[in-house]
Image: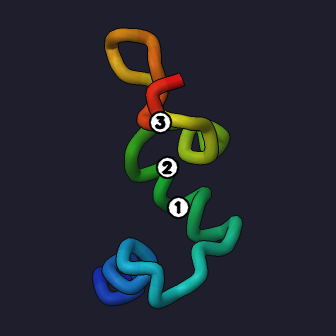
Amino acid sequence: MTNIALSRTERARRRCDVDDLVVIAAVLGVPPATLLLPFASSSGTDREGR
């Protein structure tokens, strides 16, 4: 994935396909499913306060 493609994906100007998700997860060293789950804060709530 090029820097331009990543930037466009981050700004929602380009769709993030499964293959993109796999590449991003590999670079971050996490399973792809981790990128699809709500982010849990250290207090145990997600970003939406649940």
Camera-side residue of 16 and 26: 16
Residue 22 position within the rendered picture, expressed as x and y whole percent measured from the top left = 60, 57
The residue at the point 29 percent across, 81 percent down is: 3
In the rendered structure, which amino acid carries the disc numbered 1?
Answer: Val
Residue 26: which numbered mark, if any?
2
Is residue 1 something that shows in the picture? no
SS for dot 1: helix
Residue 38 position within the rendered picture, expressed as x and y whole percent measured from the top left = 55, 36
Closer to the camera: disc 3 or disc 1? 3
Q: Are marks 2 and 3 in contact (CB under 8 Å)?
A: no
SS for dot 2: helix
Residue 48: which numbered mark, if any?
3
Q: CA distance from mark 2 to mark 3?
A: 26 Å
User: Circle 2: is it few (<14), some (14-19), or many (20+) Cα within 10 Å?
Assistant: few
Precedes in sequence: disc 3 or disc 1: 1
In the rendered structure, which amino acid carries the disc numbered 2?
Answer: Ala
Residue 27 position within the rendered picture, expressed as x and y whole percent measured from the top left = 40, 52
The residue at the point 39 percent across, 45 percent down is: 28
Left or right? Give the position of 26 relative to 42: right
Residue 26 position within the rendered picture, expressed as x and y whole percent measured from the top left = 49, 49
**Quarter of the image that includes the C terminus:** top right
User: Circle 3: is it few (<14), some (14-19), or many (20+) Cα within 10 Å?
Assistant: few
Q: Are marks 1 and 2 in contact (CB under 8 Å)?
A: yes
Residue 23: which numbered mark, if any?
1
Please say if 46 is above or below 19. above
User: Circle 1: is it few (<14), some (14-19), or many (20+) Cα within 10 Å?
Assistant: few
The residue at the point 43 percent across, 39 percent down is: 29
